[in-house]
Amino acid sequence: MAQTEIQSQNQSQPRQTANLSELDAISARLWQIAQDQQSDAASLLQILRVIEVIHKRIRDDLFQPALPTSRHELFNLLRDIETNGGWPHIYRMKINEICRYLEQPEELEQ
């Protein structure tokens, strides 16, 4: 599902500012790494932390300095963000969502 979302976002953007085939390959590799760890919550959490750090570094060190300085260019960027999928966001589970897993009855070993 995540791979499909990235591909659809890439196809909807008229201006391609990055090598999308390289991003697709990185995305596919990251997804494979996560699938290889699918039963190890600690490893998956570490993967999510790495993604979050990369997201923050790109946002703070590259994206923010590249923001337009004129109102017209900024308006065009904001319109593009709204039209093509919104602002990238890394969702964090809340503790009560995680605790719901504790409420599920454990499967009886047979």
Image (tube, rainbow, N blue to C red):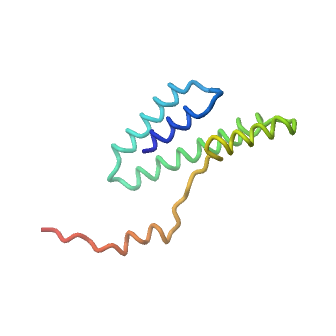
Answer with the quarter of the image where residue 54 lies: top right
The residue depicted at 53 percent of the width and 66 percent of the height is 94
* Residue at image location 47% in from the left, 35% down from the top: 27
Quadrant location of the C terminus?
Answer: bottom left
Q: How many marks?
A: 0
Residue drawn at the location 74% of the way across and 42% of the way down: 78
Q: Is residue 12 left or right of residue 1?
A: right
Q: Is residue 19 left or right of residue 39?
A: right
Q: Nearer the viewer, residue 53 or 103?
A: 103
Q: Residue furthest right?
A: 70
Q: Which residue, as the protein is rendered here, is positioned at the far left?
A: 110
In the rendered image, residue 57, in percent from the top left (x then y), is placed at 65, 41
Of 46 and 36, which appears nearest the observer? 36
**Image quarter (top left, top right, bottom left or bottom right) of the N terminus:** top left
Position of residue 100 relative to residue 27, above or below, is below
Task: Give residue 71's quadrant in the image.
Answer: top right
For residue 60, side relative to residue 88 (left or right): right
Residue 23 percent across, percent down from the top left: 52, 30
**Residue 13 percent location from the top left of the image:** 61, 32
Q: Residue at x 57, y 51 (%)?
A: 90
**Residue 88 at x, y percent in the picture:** 62, 46
Q: Nearer the viewer, residue 11 or 21?
A: 11
